[in-house]
Image (cartoon, rainbow, N blue to C red):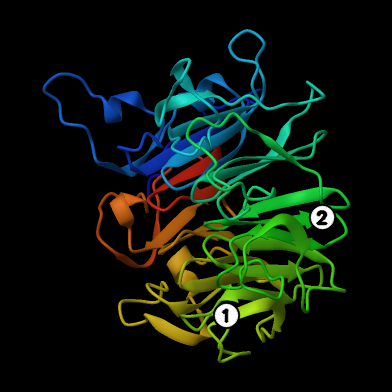
């Protein structure tokens, strides 16, 4: 008879599962929040990239509730600590446009890069307010709170911060934190493209602002928009429950599981409904494989998860179906064995990469792998989903242009 191996249980019933944050990818921008990666000391060469996840100590000291990656910077939402730091927002990495707030070594000398997380002051009326969600674009940050609405900071060259564009505005030493006031109803989700922003209200209405050259604002034109306006087209009259964008292509899901899209279609993202390279209004996208539960769009492709936890991808690039599957106008179903036959719960993307989380909390990534941002131990392109080694349950992933962050929960 086969001898059974002993089983050891180290966790007790009283063990608390803690939130943890893992980061990986490009290091030299400071976005990974580890000073020694950027300034390792005498005679030691700085590490250009970290291609395996490492656990940030910041999340061991502060209770992190959300994390978002921009282009070379990372923002954390955390519980205020009156002893350590009473801020509820922190950031690390590039700060060339004050996307991490005005940070000065001394007065008149703004810091263009931070190598470790620092507090970002917000003009809160209610000091008990908490951050519900953070989102980051190329050089701007959007913060959703529970009691004080939405704040934006950083570059506003195209109106992506939800305020009129000021010609010649100095961003590197700009202390302005703008409060968005032009959207009726309660905002429940915010998402950032490269240089535009989407807002979703509790009534299921979608508003947008920012760069509109590829129709990504969905306002029926290709001009930049400073004050947020309601997205036009087929989403009107529908109750939208989730929006997704990362570059200049947008997807929205209704409460009935129907899919809508607008923005850039240069790579065939919306070729099923138009031959145009841009959609300036939202259009209903017929999806024959069941109601859509989650969606994301990269710079050149789209991906969705249906109610069965199956992943479908289309567009251009490394779609996840092997080295020959680089372009498809129709959704391609990724075989479930690629995810160890586990249903997928969420899917995220950056310009050329995708990340999927299964129901059991495992993370899989694939794509170009810029600066090792897939976290799979090398910097080579990955043609199909590959599991990332993280010793924790993954709750959410945020993808920057060359780094990623995962909000996790410990197993014990």
Q: Does residue 309 appear anywhere in the picture?
A: no
* CA gap, disc 1 and disc 2: 25 Å
Question: Which residue is nearer to you in this view: 148 or 166?
Answer: 166
Q: Residues within 10 Å of mark 2 (few under 14, many from 20)?
A: many
Q: Is residue 240 above or below residue 374?
A: below
Q: Is residue 178 above or below residue 230?
A: above
Q: Residue at x 69, y 51 (%)?
A: 190
Q: Residues within 10 Å of mark 1 (few under 14, many from 20)?
A: many
Task: Tell me the number on the disc at residue 14.
Answer: none
SS assignment at label 1: strand
Residue 2 in percent (x, y) is at 38, 51
Residue 89 in percent (x, y) is at 61, 29
User: Is 337 on the left or on the right of 187, as rendered?
Assistant: left
Residue 249 in percent (x, y) is at 57, 69
User: Is 125 on the left or on the right of 112, as rendered?
Assistant: right
Q: In which quadrant of the rendered view does residue 133 lie?
A: top right
Q: Residue at x 63, y 50 (%)?
A: 165
Q: Find disc 2 in the rendering and name its residue.
A: 201
Q: Is residue 34 above or below residue 219?
A: above
Residue 71 in percent (x, y) is at 44, 48
Dot 1 and dot 2 residues touching (CB under 8 Å):
no
Q: Residue at x 58, y 42 (%)?
A: 141
Task: Tell me the number on the disc at residue 278.
Answer: 1
Question: Which residue is nearer to you in this view: 154 or 337?
Answer: 154
Marks 1 and 2, the one that precedes in the sequence: 2
SS assignment at label 2: strand
Q: Is residue 236 above or below residue 360?
A: below
Q: Residue at x 38, y 45 (%)?
A: 3
């Amino acid at each position: 008879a086969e001898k059974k191996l002993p089983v050891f249980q180290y966790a007790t019933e009283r063990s608390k599962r803690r939130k943890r944050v893992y980061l990986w990818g490009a290091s030299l921008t400071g976005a990974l929040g580890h000073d020694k990666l950027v300034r390792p000391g005498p005679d030691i060469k700085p590490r250009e990239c970290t291609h395996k996840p490492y656990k940030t100590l910041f999340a061991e000291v502060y209770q992190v509730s959300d994390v978002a990656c921009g282009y070379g910077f990372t923002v954390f939402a955390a519980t205020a600590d009156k002893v350590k730091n009473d801020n509820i927002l922190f950031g690390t990495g590039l700060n060339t446009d004050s996307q991490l707030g005005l940070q000065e070594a001394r007065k008149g000398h703004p810091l263009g890069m931070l190598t470790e997380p620092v507090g970002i002051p917000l003009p809160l009326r209610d000091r008990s307010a908490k951050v519900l969600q953070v989102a980051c674009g190329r050089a701007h940050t959007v913060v959703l709170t529970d009691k004080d609405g939405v704040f934006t900071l950083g570059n506003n060259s195209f109106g992506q911060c939800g305020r009129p564009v000021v010609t010649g505005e100095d961003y590197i030493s700009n202390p302005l934190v703008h409060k968005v006031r032009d959207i009726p109803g309660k905002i429940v989700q915010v998402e950032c493209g490269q240089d535009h922003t989407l807002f979703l209200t509790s009534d299921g209405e979608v508003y947008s602002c920012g760069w509109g050259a590829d129709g990504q604002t969905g306002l029926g034109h290709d001009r930049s928009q400073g004050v947020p306006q309601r997205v036009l087209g087929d989403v009107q009259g529908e109750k939208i429950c989730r929006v997704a964008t990362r570059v200049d292509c947008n997807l929205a899901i209704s409460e009935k599981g129907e899919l809508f899209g607008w923005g850039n279609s240069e790579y065939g993202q919306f070729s099923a409904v138009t031959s145009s390279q841009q959609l300036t209004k939202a259009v209903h996208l017929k999806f024959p494989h069941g109601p859509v539960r989650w969606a994301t769009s990269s710079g050149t492709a789209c991906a969705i998860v249906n109610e069965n936890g199956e992943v479908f991808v289309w567009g251009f690039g490394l779609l996840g179906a092997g080295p020959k599957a680089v372009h498809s106008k129709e959704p391609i179903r990724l075989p479930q064995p690629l995810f160890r036959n586990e249903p997928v719960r969420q899917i995220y993307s950056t310009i050329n990469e995708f990340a999927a989380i299964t129901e059991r909390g495992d993370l899989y990534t694939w794509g170009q792998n810029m600066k090792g941002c897939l976290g799979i131990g090398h910097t080579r392109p990955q043609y199909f989903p590959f599991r990332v080694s993280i010793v924790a349950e993954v709750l959410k992933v945020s993808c920057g242009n060359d780094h990623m962050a995962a909000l996790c929960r410990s197993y014990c």
